[in-house]
Image (cartoon, rainbow, N blue to C red):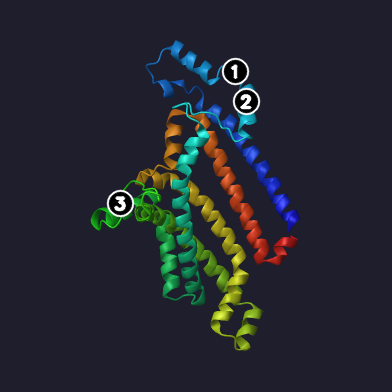
Amino acid sequence: MVNLILKRLTSGIALLLIVTSAAFFMAHIAVGDPTPGLLGNNATAAQRAALRAQLGLDRPLMVQYWDWFSHAIRGDFGNSWRNFQPVGDQIALRLPVTLSVVLAATLLTAVLGLAVGIASGRHPGGAVDRVLKLASVALFALPGFWVSLVLVMWFAINLRWFPAVGYVAPAESFTGWLRSITLPAVSLALGGIVMLGEQLRNAFVQVSGSDFVRTLRARGLPEWRVTRHVLRNASASTLAVLALILVGLLGGAIVVEIVFDLPGIGSLTQSASQIGDIPILLGLTAVTVAFVVIVNFLLDLVLGWVNPKARVQ
C-alpha cells in the first residue's frame, strides 16, 4: 500500500508540473499581446509598450517561464494583470463558492445515483429501469444551461422557493447559503445522477448473474445481505465513474456559475479569458489539475481498501 501511495504521489506531481508548464506556453501563444484587452483599443503604442515592460512581457519567453515556474512551485502565481492583486488570494476567495456547489452536486449524485442504480439493477426492465433509460437520453440531449434556466423559471421565479441568482456565505446565513447553492447543485447533478445510475445498474446486473450470488440465494440469505455483497463487488467501477463525474462537475461549474451569477472560479475564468489575464488562467489551471490529482489519489486509496486485488496490481 505504501508503494501505491508513493507511486501515485510521484505521478500526480509529475502530471501537475507537465500540464501547468504546457499551459504556460499555450496561453502565451493563444493570447499573444494582452495589452489591447487590458488597456482597450484606444491605447497608444507607447502605453502598450510601457505595460508590456511593466508585466515583463518584453523579456524572452523562456525567461518569463522560469520566473513564473520558480515562483509557482512555492505557491506564488504572481499578480493579476487586470487589478494587480495576488492570484492566490483571488482564487482562495472564490474557490469555496465553487467547491460548495461541486461537493453538494457530488453528494446528490452519489445518493440519488446509487438509489436509482440499485432500484433499476434489482428489477431490469421494470418501471425504474425504463425511466432511467428515458432520462439518460433526455438529459444528455438537453444543454446544461437550458436545464439551469428551466430550474430558475420553475423554482425561483414561479414558485419562489430559491433565489434566482446570487450567493450567500455560510458564515452570514447557513439557511441562505443552502438555498443559494441548491439550484446550481441540482443543475450540475442531474446528468451525473443518470450516468452513475446507468453504471451501477449495469454493474449490478452483471454481478447479480455470478455464481456466488446464486449460491448466496440458495443458502437462504436475506435479500438485503445479497444486495450488500453485490454492491461490494460492483463498487470498483462505480467509484471510478463517480470520481470522473466529480472532476467533470468542476468544469461544468463554469457554465452554472455564469447562469446563477455565483462569484466562483467559473466567473473568474470567464473574465480572465476575455482580457487575456494569463496569471489568473495559469493559477486556475494549477488548482484544477491539483484537484484532479487529489481526486484520483483518493480514488486509488478507496479502491485499494475496497478491493485487495487493486493493492497488489
Which residue lies at the image location 60% right of the left edge and 50% below the top edge? Answer: 294
> Residue 211, relative to residue 256: is it above or below?
below
| Residue 53, image x, y percentages | 53, 16
Circle 3 SS class: loop
Q: Is residue 246 left or right of residue 189?
A: right
Circle 1 residues within 10 Å: few <14, some 14–19, many ≥20: few
> Residue 297, relative to residue 39: is it above or below?
below
Q: CA distance from mark 2 to mark 3?
A: 44 Å
Q: Is residue 205 left or right of residue 267?
A: right
Which residue lies at the image location 56% right of the left edge and 56% below the top edge? Answer: 243
| Residue 121, image x, y percentages | 51, 73
Residue hosting label 2 = 67
Q: Amino acid at mark 3?
A: Pro
Q: Amino acid at mark 1?
A: Arg
Q: Is residue 268 left or right of residue 74?
A: left
Which residue lies at the image location 72% right of the left edge and 55% below the top edge? Answer: 4
> Who is closer to the viewer here, 13 or 230?
13
Q: Amino acid at mark 2?
A: Asp
Circle 2 residues within 10 Å: few <14, some 14–19, many ≥20: few
Give the position of the N terminus as an image quadrant. Answer: bottom right
For marks 2 and 3 on the same chain, the one whose residue lies earlier in the sequence: 2
Circle 2 SS class: helix
Residue hosting label 1 = 59
Residue hosting label 3 = 163
| Residue 127, image x, y percentages | 41, 75
For marks 1 and 3 on the same chain, the one whose residue lies earlier in the sequence: 1
